[in-house]
Image (spheres, rainbow, N blue to C red):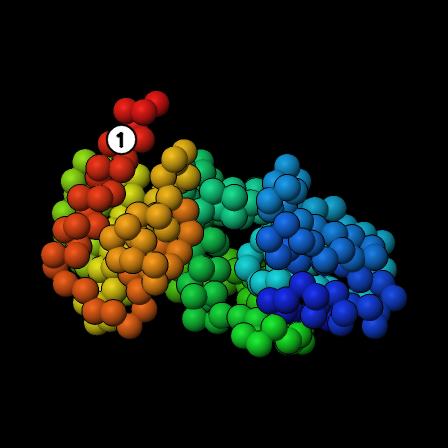
Amino acid sequence: MKVLLSSSGESLRTALTSYASTATVEAEYGDEVVEGTVATLAHHGTRAGNPCPCLCDPVPAGSVGMFGVSHIDLDALGGILGLLGSRPGPRSFWELAAYIDTRGPHKVGESGACPEDLEKLYAWWAWSESHRCAPPRDGSVADVTDYVTSATETLGRIMDDDPEMLARGEEWCARKDALNKSSFLERVNDVIVRVHVEFVNGLYVDPDGRPSLAVVGYNPAKGGVTISLADPISGVSCAEIARMLWGPLAGGHAGIAGSPRGERLGLDDIVKARDAMVAVLWGARHDD
């Protein structure tokens, strides 16, 4: 198993031409996809109707000489191992992985997954949170075979119910529950306001277990405000709201956006962001 990683589709495509047999997994760059000679697993944008890579069927043994990817996450790893015919664990776990990949980690409570698969997922998240693999910022190509090998070995331990790995998953869950409580400031209609030095815009369920539509997060260490949506909402763009609040230097996407980097905001800005999100969501709901 050999794997190349790049944030540039052009760079990855050029690198893969040196190999006779290739497969790509989520090598997607906007509407562009880098195709493999043996297999191309892609499910974003215009290819959204395709199944998640982690649910793929294997190809003939030894038919892939090099894999190409745009990023490494559980779905991509499952796609690589699936093509090789060496994906560990039950199919139900990978169905859970696909569910999370398409809907977001904050939807795990709605997955209906069994406790055994959930504890394995938490164990994986605990490991991956401290073992990131990012592509080079300059768009060059990196050989990440060693990382993928390490991640595969870790996944194998988790699927074998390694007590240490599962315990780490339990600890990870406990920390997230504590973060949910400690970061919670208030809830106004369907908007939760959180304050913490850690990233909190993935916590869409309040400490009482009630889901929300949006989160306004404030990092007191950096002075930045981040606004985000639990799910896409027609006519609502966090990027547009952020630019309305903080000007053209605010960055982000429809689902999540933030105040300009390096600009310290205060409590008044949290309130303005909260009120803006409440107003926009109210308007979207009544427009329907």
Q: Residue at x 35, y 48 (%)?
A: 240
Question: In front here: 53 or 137?
Answer: 137
Outermost residue on the front side: it is: 248
Q: Is residue 255 above or below residue 259?
A: above
Image x and y of residue 98, in percent:
56, 45
Image x and y of residue 196, in percent:
21, 63
Image x and y of residue 152, in percent:
61, 65
Q: Quadrant of the N terminus?
A: bottom right
Image x and y of residue 276, in percent:
22, 44
Q: Is residue 109 visible?
A: no
Q: Residue at x 25, y 43 (%)?
A: 277
Q: Quadrant of residue 159?
A: bottom right
Q: Is residue 283 visible?
A: yes
Q: Quadrant of the C terminus?
A: top left
Question: In front here: 226 or 104?
Answer: 226
Element type at mark 1: helix
| Label tally | 1
Task: From the viewer's perspective, tell me whether residue 248 is left or right of residue 33.
Answer: left
Task: From the viewer's perspective, tell me whether residue 206 is left or right of residue 16.
Answer: left
**Residues packed near mark 1 inside 10 Å, few (<14), some (14 to 19) or many (20 plus):** few
Q: Residue at x 62, y 57 (%)?
A: 29
- What residue sits right under mark 1 in the picture? 283
Q: Is residue 188 above or below residue 62?
A: above
Amino acid type, label 1: Gly
Q: Residue at x 41, y 33 (%)?
A: 234
Q: Is residue 204 above or below residue 168?
A: above
Outermost residue on the left side: it is: 268
